[in-house]
Amino acid sequence: MNCPHCDFTRTEIYRTDTRTEGSTPYVIRRRICDNCKTKFTTYECADVKTLAQKITKTAALMKALSEMKHAVGVDE
Ligand SMILES: [Zn+2]
């Protein structure tokens, strides 16, 4: 994580909290830049919605592929 103030590449985490909003847990990290000593906050959570969409798309592709194999007579 680069510093948003000076773009330095090394920052230190000095506090971590885990919270839940709805059913989605997320992590709040307080960081301090090793260069300019500015403190800032980052938020981290799993991208569950995108992951679910990818799984749905993969399942749809697998079904379409299976139907195409069946239509042209390819053994699975
Ligand atoms: Zn900085």
Image (spheres, rainbow, N blue to C red):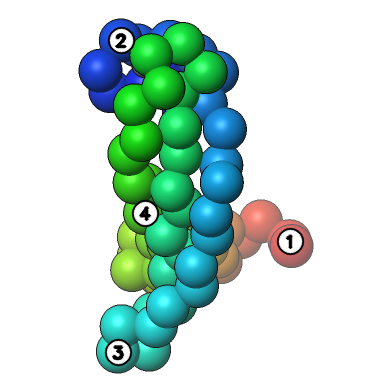
Please, is residue 58 above or below residue 25 in the view? above
Residue in view at x 37 percent, y 54 percent: 43
Please, is residue 26 above or below residue 54 in the view? below
Q: Which residue is mark 2?
A: 6
Residue 15 appearing in the image:
yes
Please, is residue 25 above or below residue 9 in the view? below
Q: Quadrant of ligand 1?
A: top left
- For residue 13, which quarter of the picture? top right
Which numbered disc, 4 or 2, marks the residue that appears first in the sequence?
A: 2
Residue in view at x 42 percent, y 78 percent: 19
Q: Is mark 2 within 8 Å of ligand 1?
A: yes
What's the residue type where badge 3 is placed?
Gly
Q: Is residue 67 left or right of residue 6?
A: right
The Cα–Cα distance between marks 2 and 3, rounded to whole angstroms, is 35 Å
Tell which tag, 1 or 4, sits nearer the viewer.
4
Which numbered disc, 2 or 1, marks the residue that appears first in the sequence?
A: 2
Q: Which residue is mark 4?
A: 43
Residue in view at x 25 percent, y 18 percent: 5
Which numbered disc, 2 or 3, marks the residue that appears first in the sequence?
A: 2
What's the residue type where badge 2 is placed?
Cys
Tell which tag, 2 or 3, sits nearer the viewer.
2
User: In terms of secondary structure, where does tag 2 sit?
Assistant: loop
Return the residue nearer the eye: 32 or 43. 32
Which numbered disc, 1 or 3, marks the residue that appears first in the sequence?
A: 3
Identify the residue at the far bottom of this view: 22
x and y percent of residue 76 in the render? 74, 62
User: In terms of secondary structure, where does tag 4 sit?
Assistant: strand
User: In terms of secondary structure, where does tag 3 sit?
Assistant: loop
x and y percent of residue 47 in the render? 40, 60
Q: Residues within 10 Å of mark 4 (few under 14, many from 20)?
A: few
Q: Which residue is mark 1?
A: 75
